[in-house]
Amino acid sequence: MISYQIETKNLNVYYHKNHVLKNIDIKIPAKQLTAVIGPSGCGKTTLLKSFNRLLEIQEESKIEGQILVDGENILDRKGSEVPDIRKKMGLLSQKPYPLPMSIRDNVAYGLRIHSNKNKGEIEKTVEHCLKEVGLWNEVKGRLHDSASRLSVGQQQRLCLARAIAVQPEVVLCDEPTSALDPLAAQQIEKLLLRLKKEYTVILVTHTLRQAKRVADYIIFLYFGMVIEQGPADEFFNAPKNPETKAYLSGEIS
Amino acid sequence: MNTRKLRDIIGTNLMRIVTLFIPLLFFFILILLIYKSTLVLGTHSITDVLFSTIWNPDNGQFGLAAVIIDTILVTGIALIVAIPISLLSAVYIVEYAPLRLRRTIRPFIDVLAGVPSVVYGLCAFLFLAPFVKNVVAPWFGIQSTGLCIFSAAIILSIMVFPIIISLCIESFDAIPLSLKEASLSIGATKWETVKKVVFRASAPSIMAAVLLGFGRAFGETIAVNMVIGGTIRLPSSVFNPGETLASLIASKYGELMSIPLHESALMLVALILFIAVLLFYFVGFLLLRRAKKRWNY
Amino acid sequence: MNKRIIEENIFKILMIASVCIVLGSLMVIFGLVIVNGISSLTIQMITQTPALAPPGSPPGGGILNAIVGSLLLALPATGLASLIGIGIALFLQADFLHPALSNAIRFMLDVLWGIPSIIYGIFCLMIMIYIGMSSSLIVGIIALTMLEIPIITRCMDESIKMVPIGLREGSYSLGSTKFETAIRVVRRQAFPGILAGILLGLGRGIGDAASILFTAGFSNRIPTSIFDSTAALPTMIYNLYSTPLGQSKAFAAAFLLLIIVLVVSVLSRLLTRRFKKHIIK
């Protein structure tokens, strides 16, 4: 029996008066890697950003419907509770955006805001997270260096370390490897495979191959609508919809 | 040589000549001020001029210490008031204000920047000064005519608002949305994001804005002149009248144009003013240019 | 979490208070000038020059001398500064000068924009005395021109910079020289922005007192030659603000100045908006 961590019911998202997401009803299984696939511009990023309510910082957006996380509709919560919701969802964006501070401070950022840990505990957690993402050996001698000095691939891993430092339940990844070279991309994919044992990972990707490599569960979005969703092998081997078949065979991309 | 080529050569050279005006003007002003100051510096040592508080041209005494102190007080108070108000306003306009409100406020800031100094001075003289005289100074237990250092500082801070606010808005706007999203997605509040990300990323620009504000405040002549009271004496409180370097020039110039020594002393003041403002702007613009290169996202 | 929310709310209140202070001071200044200015703005005020009144009674007449004086000072100065400015701004493009030189000149322009205007006044005054002239319209115009050149040039420069390089290259490839491209293609694209810069300079020039205080002098009459001293709106305010009887004139002049500031502000906004709409990308 799969347990679903996130469910959406009749989710509709409007951006600048455009109806970007239409009647989305999906279920995201817990502690698995769900890939959201589909052609560019279909609303995948918008979907991701509604999960951690990041969309609403832009005034021109409107959300209707329900997003249930562990059974509770997060859209009902007040504005002052939103930071706590976001804490539960880590975000890894397409281009790495290290904060304008040192490597250590980047990872410790969330810790210093949310917890009362003392300096020693924070150092330990920073080390632990950097080890988790495989950065520790590369940066352990220069934690006070500015994060901008790292390579793009290292920065992306740093952003991941920063995200998991606050112990989220869900990790949202928005095409995290598209800005990276193949080697760095591979590292991130390996990390995601490890992460999905502890966290629910939602990965937006526009390469089918990547989805095939890492996903347990697939959601196929096409022009803002969910065409098909289901376990990965079912999806790839026995697609039900004509659009799905067309996408899988490369006719539409 | 056909007319087209001739036109081209004349046109290009005209432009070249006219562009030369700029460095010429710049250095010509500087050199003239230095030249004119040498007279008074010939008979008075620079330490006398800078550190004596007695300004008595008839006796040949040109002590600027009181004026310098007044200038520092006026500029300092003006900026202490203006910086937090401007920073907070800029943050509100960029981060918190609803879109429509943002669009309406921006033009107001530009208009504030365009109001001539005399108008500020007029309003300060007729309304700020009596207010200081009747309400503010008595609250501190001090008697004042209202034409004092404090009034000059307050009107100056209002004049400085638009400079700092618009530079900060420009800088805050330039921060990529995704950077702020990165902070928010870890569960930081908007204010924490402002504190730890926006301010940090904008730090050089904010510094530059402050320096440019300083430069403006330091050099403001007319508005200060109209409310500062024109007394050259060491002040015992900010509610005493005084004179800044800039307002001194405006006050004293008409009187003694024919006495070379006095004129030379005022030219020295102008030179000090020129160099000080030059430094503020120099460092300010340098910071602004560096800021644009720093964090490339 | 509560502590963080409380902190945010405290600062939100401070922020709103700050915006209110800024907008409030603007409103207060405008309010004061409008309320006092409107009551002084009679037909007599704008059509007459100051009249001598018998001692003991308020000075009569109006501020026509200042109005005409301001126009006679600011318009030629702006015209001159614009001509010079467009030459400099066009020349600063990378096509003519090495970029390091261009930036050095831009920097000097920025500094010249920022120095106190009284320095321009003193500078012209020195030269004026040296040549043996007395304070007059012509010297005032020169001082204002110097004041306005950096402002106008930099604004023009900024809008010309926005002309995409592809446009210029297209012109070159058709066989135009640098000069011709500058005059025809670049200037036309950047035209609204250039106009906005001119307006800004004009607004500054009309409102500035320090540069013309000693150079244009003061007079109760309308100047008849460029060697006459003349009053101007800002100097009128400066001379009359402290006399209780002259204050009505001062406010009338201030009111006119504010109207000019508003008009300049609105016009340059409209122009920059139109500029952004029509720019070829």
Image: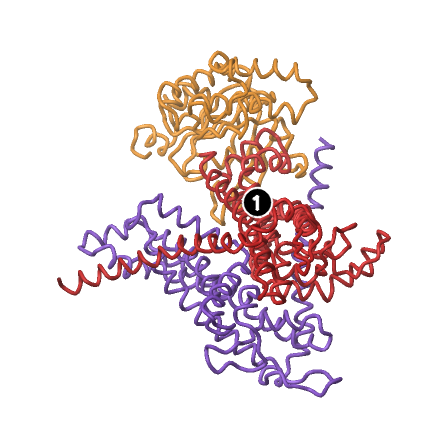
Chain colours: A orange, B red, C purple
Left or right, B42 with reference to C275: right
Q: How many marks?
A: 1
* Crowding at mark 1 (Cα within 10 Å: few <14, some 14-19, many 20+): many
Q: Is residue A102 above or below residue C31?
A: above
Q: Identify the image quadrant of residue C45.
A: bottom right
Chain holding disc 1:
B
Q: Position of residue C12 (x, y in %)?
A: 69, 44
- According to the picture, the residue beneath numbered tag 1 turns out to be B211
- For image coordinates 67% across by 79% down, the residue present is C40
Left or right, C269 with reference to B119: left
Q: Mark 1 belongs to which amino acid?
A: Leu
Q: Nearer the viewer, residue B187 or B125?
A: B125
Q: Position of residue A53 (x, y in %)?
A: 58, 36
Q: Is residue A185 above or below residue C169?
A: above
Q: Nearer the viewer, residue A15 or A97?
A: A97
Could you tell me which quadrant the C terminus of chain B lies in?
top left
Q: Nearer the viewer, residue C4 or B25?
A: B25
Q: Nearer the viewer, residue A165 or A2?
A: A165
- For image coordinates 38% across by 36% down, the residue present is A40
Could you tell me which quadrant the N terminus of chain B lies in?
bottom left
Q: Is residue A32 above or below residue B229?
A: above
- For image coordinates 53% across by 45% down, the residue present is B279
Residue C136 shows in this picture? yes
Q: Identify the image quadrant of residue A185.
A: top left
Q: Is residue A162 above or below residue A19?
A: above
Left or right, C33 with reference to B1: right
Q: Secondary structure at mark 1?
A: helix
